Structure formats: structure tokens, C-alpha cells
Image (cartoon, rainbow, N blue to C red):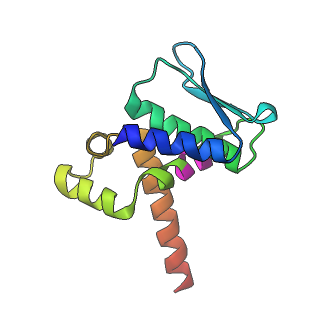
Amino acid sequence: MNEQRLAELIELCTSQGVRVEWVDLGAHRHGQYQRRLRLIELNPRLVLRQLVPVLAHEYAHFVYDDGCSSAARERRAWEHAALMLITPADYARAERLVGSHPNAIATELDLTPVVVRAWRRQHRAAALARDDCA
């Protein structure tokens, strides 16, 4: 599944004029978006279940035209990535199968816990917004 996700994300980037390259970013940096170059750099040290969320996250920086990083921009990019990668049905199925722990759900979805937590944050915020309008 992640092979297909990765191919789709790379195609999405390409269709938007964003290049994707693999660059050794060291042991701790997973990816980065270089706005001026319209370039997403991904660390080749990542395994596929890390690579897919990181690419979606960096693509979100492109979508929001982020030129630099801040806590709010990083949170927004992870939430955008989560919505790209996890449907409500997928999340519900995973939670039924493995329980509510984010690590277990992430393993079931073949993603990372950071994406699951971001999905939860965004999902809760959307639910609260709906409740406020009711």
C-alpha cells in the first residue's frame, strides 16, 4: 500500500511542478521543502512507512507556501498530511482492530504515530467546529 501511496504522492508533486529528490539530511532530519527551488528533499535513510508521511508533510508546506518553519506551520503540515493519508473509515477500521493507542493504529495503517496524532487533532477540531455551529 505504501508503495502506491509514495508513487501517487510523487506524481502529485510532479503535477504541481515540485521536484522530489533524495538527499542525505543526516540522522535526524527527515525531509525539507525548499520553496525557492520548488524542491522537496527526502532522507534516503527513511523506511517506507516514514517516507510516505514525510513526503505528504513536505507537500503540505508547498500547498501553504511555507517559506520557513514554526511550530504552527509544522502542526498544520502534519494535519494536512494526515488528511491526505487517513480516511475516517480507515481510522475507524484500524481502531476497531487494534484499539485506540496511536502507535498500534499507526502500525495497522502502515504509517507513523505522528500522523495518527495529527489526524486525531484535526478530527477533534473539526468535530468541535461542527458542534459550535449546531
Which residue is pictured at 82% across the width and 33% down the height? 36
Horizontal side of 111 relative to 68 (left or right) equals left
Which residue is pictured at 46% across the width and 38% down the height? 6
Which quadrant holds residue 90? Answer: bottom left
Compared to residue 71, the image places residue 20 above or below, namely above
Q: Is residue 114 visible?
A: yes
Which quadrant holds residue 42? Answer: top right
Q: Nearer the viewer, residue 3 or 75?
A: 3
Quadrant for the N terminus in the image: top left
Query: What x and y, as percent, mark residue 14?
Result: 64, 41
Which residue is pictured at 65% across the width and 47% down the height? 15
The reply to whether the magenta stretch includes residue 2 is no
The reply to whether the magenta stretch includes residue 79 is yes
Magenta-drawn stretch, dominant element (helix, strand or loop): helix
Compared to residue 93, the image places residue 57 above or below, namely above
Which residue is pictured at 56% across the width and 52% down the height? 80
Horizontal side of 111 relative to 33 (left or right) equals left
| Name of the residue lying farthest toward the right | 36
Query: What x and y, as percent, mark residue 96?
Result: 20, 58
Q: Is residue 112 visible?
A: no
State the extent of the magenta-drawn residues as a range. 75-80
Compared to residue 122, the image places residue 62 above or below, namely above
| Name of the residue lying farthest toward the left | 97
| Name of the residue lying farthest toward the bottom | 134
